[in-house]
Amino acid sequence: MTFSINLLYDLQQMLSYQFMQHAFETGTMIAVVAGVVGYFVVLRRSAFTAHAFSEMGFAGAAGAVVFLSVLGSYAPIVGLLLGSTTGGLAIAALSRRAANRDTQVGIVLAFGLGLGLLFLSLYTGYATEAYSILFGEILGISISNVLLTLVATVGILATVAVVYRPLLFASLDEDVAEAKGMPMLFLGTVFMLLVAVGVSFAVQVTGVLLIFSLMVTPAATAQYLAKRPQRAILISVGISLMATWVGLFVAFYTPYPVSFFITAIVFGLYLLVRLLHQRTAQGKLSSARDGLLG
């Protein structure tokens, strides 16, 4: 397929393929979830936690692939969910406060990697399944996984809508929230489950090793562009959607993987926004200094 420069015609040609329809449908849902949940991940300084979930999800998916003949085509996504949610509950149980969670996350992450390595050594089939877990395989998503992703997306967004205010308050200032008697263990567990499920489905797009590209980088960029939470979440979702759509479009006309383009787009945008933010801050500082001296 060659690129014709007529974007409307190119889009029609691309979406005439069922696998591209599934890729855009799944990518759109995952980008929205990653943009919303990723904002709380960055706000709570829990990027390391998201990485630990992806490692636990990798272990679960690798284990499920070993039993592929029993679980059928749902094996990888079921394994991802089981692995990441189990890891999330374990981390929440080991440490109630986000500020003191690094050690527990590191312990669970290391165990997840070791478990995944064990399952990979037991797997005797082709390496395709393991490769798709590590780097994503959005162009190979089936209609059943699209529907499963839709159910998870609705569940995650509904949960965020219900716990939005207390979760935001607890994320901004844990000490004050705890002093006011808010249910920190409950909120921490809900947050962990949201991240675990979100990571499980985002792995379909970027894979375990590149999970930060959708779950962290857009939200980190949005924090430079907006101070109000609602606006920052919308910008985070917008960046995730733009990177996913452009990544899919470019990858369709090139022999290179989608996940590379997504990571390159969000990383480039983050660097640009950070540079502009620093220059703006330096300009304001210089103006203030000139005003004092003048």
Image (cartoon, grey):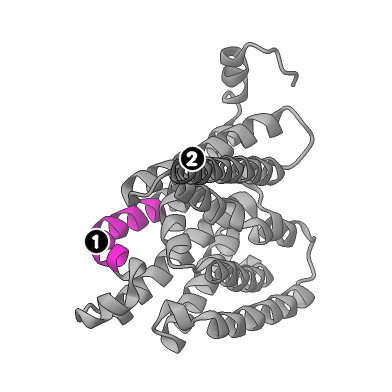
Quadrant of image for the N terminus: top right
How far apart in space, not on screen, are marks 2 and 1 (Cα)? Answer: 38 Å
* Label 1 sits on residue: 165
Extreme residue in the front direction: 294
Name the chief secondary structure element in magenta.
helix
> Residues in magenta?
151-169
Q: Amino acid at mark 2?
A: Ser
Q: Circle 1 sits in a helix, a strand or a loop, which is it? A: helix
Of the image marks 2 and 1, the number of the one nearer the N terminus: 1
Q: What type is the residue that disc 1 sits on?
A: Arg
> In terms of image quadrants, where is residue 63?
bottom right
Per the image, label 2 sits on a secondary structure element best described as: helix
Is-magenta flag for residue 239? no
The residue shown at (47%, 56%) is 38
Q: Residue at x 59, y 73 (%)?
A: 56
Q: Note whether residue 163 is visible.
A: yes
Q: Nearer the viewer, residue 128 or 133?
A: 133
Left/right of residue 27 with respect to residue 14 in the rendered view: left
* Residue 101 position in % (x across, y down): 49, 81
Q: Is residue 120 above or below residue 276?
A: below
**Residue 265 appears in which quarter of the rendering?**
top right
Would you call the spot at circle 1 few (<14 residues within 10 Å), some (14-19), or many (20 or more)? few
Q: Which residue is mark 2?
A: 287
Identified at 64% across, 83% down, the residue is: 111
Please name whichever residue, 291 or 261, is drawn nearer the observer in this view of the structure: 291
Residue 144 seen in the current view: no
